[in-house]
Image (tube, rainbow, N blue to C red):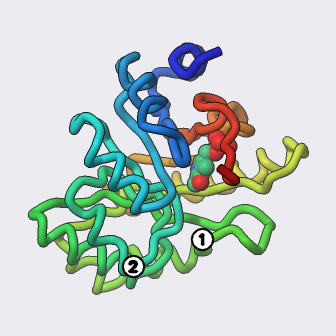
């Protein structure tokens, strides 16, 4: 199967209200164009430099999502064009995004990454830290950045009950936050291996890479 077929198949299988971010990291621009030519417009990357090169070279109506961990000193390279930053994990980072967005006269939407997996290596903050950010005076003064929801990554495991438990926890946190903070619209959870479970658990945005573009080869 090719990229266009993979993408069409996944889209036909997911509910219409769930948005699909095609994760094109490490993949060539031609693969992105193949997906683009089916009408798809939302793509995600995890490295700011790679995303920026692709943004420069590819059609300008693509919506670029940054799904990876963000270093503050690199926010300036994507502030001009990025549509959604999925993995915000500190007030300091939010402040930098606000500052860079202002320079371009833009408002940038962000998600807070909540740590739901048990692995130590996964980034993210806990629920109390997320509330701390959302209720801080500093955040209330930021005019160019808006937190519109939450993002999370489940433990990499074959144990579907465990994955369900983690996604359900994130969903209930999201619902609680949505009733407190009226900017909340988006719950980003689910990747190639677990997006069906994520949708069952109430995801509104899935991030799918290898099931669309094929396995990634990091050794090239
Ligand atoms: C790479 C990546 C994905 C997509 O992973 P696949 O398993 O290839 O679907 C989703 N989310 C994040 C944050 C990623 O870095």
| Helix, strand or loop at mark 2 | helix
Q: Can residue 8 be seen in this view?
A: yes
Q: Mark 1 points at which residue?
A: 124
Residue 20 to residue 94: above or below:
above
To which quarter of the image does residue 43 belong? Answer: top left
At 15% from the left and 60% from the top, the residue drawn is 106
Residue 124 to residue 215: above or below:
below
Locate residue 147, reporting x and y percent: 36, 62
Q: How far apart are marks 1 and 2 (CA)?
A: 15 Å
Marks counted in the figure total 2
Query: Mark 2: is the Cβ under 8 angstroms from ligand 1?
Result: no
Q: Nearer the viewer, residue 89 or 141?
A: 89
Point out the image quarter for the N terminus: top right
Locate residue 137, reporting x and y percent: 29, 85
Q: Residues within 10 Å of mark 1 (few under 14, many from 20)?
A: many
Kindly report which numbered mark, 1 or 2, lies closer to the viewer in this rendering: 2
At 55% from the left and 39% from the top, the residue drawn is 206
Locate residue 118, reporting x and y percent: 80, 66
| Helix, strand or loop at mark 1 | loop
Q: Mark 2 points at which residue?
A: 72
At 45% from the left and 76% from the top, the residue drawn is 71
- Contact between labelled residues 2 and 1, with CB atoms less than 8 Å apart: no
Residue furthest left as drawn: 105
Locate residue 80, reporting x and y percent: 20, 59
At 86% from the left and 44% from the top, the residue drawn is 161
Q: Which of 28 and 211 is in front in this view?
A: 28
Residue furthest right as drawn: 159
Residue furthest front as drawn: 220
Residue 154 lies left or right of residue 19; in this view the side is right
Q: Which of marks 1 and 2 is nearer the N terminus?
A: 2
């Amino acid at each position: 199967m090719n990229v266009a077929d993979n993408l069409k198949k996944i889209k036909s299988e997911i509910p219409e209200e769930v948005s699909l971010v095609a994760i094109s990291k490490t993949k060539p621009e031609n693969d992105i164009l193949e997906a683009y030519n089916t009408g798809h417009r939302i793509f995600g990357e995890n490295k700011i430099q790679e995303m920026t090169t692709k943004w420069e070279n590819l059609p300008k109506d693509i919506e670029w999502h940054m799904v990876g961990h963000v270093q503050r000193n690199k926010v300036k390279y994507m502030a001009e064009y990025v549509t959604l930053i999925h993995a915000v994990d500190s007030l300091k980072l939010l402040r930098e995004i606000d500052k860079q967005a202002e320079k371009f006269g833009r408002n940038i939407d962000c998600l807070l990454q909540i740590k739901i997996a048990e692995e130590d290596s996964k980034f993210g903050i806990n629920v109390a830290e997320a509330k701390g950010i959302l209720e801080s005076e500093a955040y209330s003064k930021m005019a160019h950045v808006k937190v519109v929801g939450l993002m999370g990554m489940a433990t990499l495991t074959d144990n579907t009950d465990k994955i369900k438990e983690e996604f359900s926890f994130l969903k209930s946190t999201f619902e609680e936050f949505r009733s407190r903070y009226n900017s909340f619209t988006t719950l980003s959870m689910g990747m190639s291996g677990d997006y069906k479970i994520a949708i069952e658990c109430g995801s509104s945005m899935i991030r799918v890479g290898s099931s669309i573009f094929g396995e990634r080869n990091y050794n090239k």
